[in-house]
Amino acid sequence: MPRTVRESRSRLVRHALQAIGLLSLALGVIGIFLPLLPTTPFLLLAAACFMRSSQRFYFWLIGHPHLGPWVRDYLDGEGIPLKGKVYAVGLMWTSILLSCYLIPLASARLFMLASAVLVTRYILRQKTRPVRAG
């Protein structure tokens, strides 16, 4: 896990990344309580944004007693829990197929399906974190 933060030199970029990070953080927290909203991707996006915009926010997030483990496990290379993989891939394909049904443009459908295949491949290739005892 990176111990140093390389903040962007541009003030505008830092503020934009902080805004995106805060929005992602809020969506990640909401995702803990709403089963249709994934938590981990939003928290990872928030960490990535904070890593380039705010050392204080980044270290707060990865050190948080409840939110930090979601990010640290991934950054430390421990992998993604099987339940998380199944949830992410299942929800993604459900939303992609629904979108393909609702959107008549063949090019948009092709793009969505290709994106879903690539993201599924990426998720499945990630190390599966073993279930922790306790």
Image (tube, grey):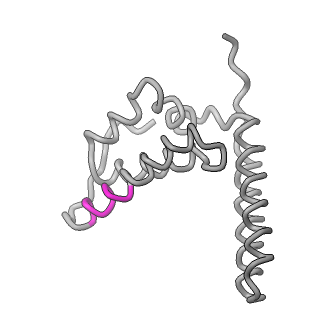
Q: Is residue 96 left or right of residue 23?
A: right
Q: Position of residue 91 (x, y in %)?
A: 73, 53
- Which one is nearer the viewer's eye here, 66 or 37? 37
Vertical order, 42 against 66 (above or below):
below
Q: Residue at coordinates 50% horizontally, 37% vertically from top-left?
A: 71
The residue range painted magenta reads: 13-20
- Asked if residue 54 lies in the magenta stretch, the reply is no
Q: Residue at coordinates 70% horizontally, 13% vertically from top-left?
A: 133
Q: Position of residue 35 (x, y in %)?
A: 65, 43
Magenta segment's dominant SS is helix
- Asked if residue 16 lies in the magenta stretch, the reply is yes
Indicate the quadrant where residue 79 lies. top right
Vertical order, 128 against 120 (above or below):
above
Q: Residue at coordinates 71% horizontally, 55% vertically from top-left?
A: 122
Q: Residue furthest top?
A: 134
Q: Position of residue 18 (x, y in %)?
A: 31, 55
Q: Is residue 125 left or right of residue 5?
A: right
- Which one is nearer the viewer's eye here, 102 or 28? 102
Q: Position of residue 63 (x, y in %)?
A: 38, 28
In the rendered image, which quarter contains the N terminus?
top left
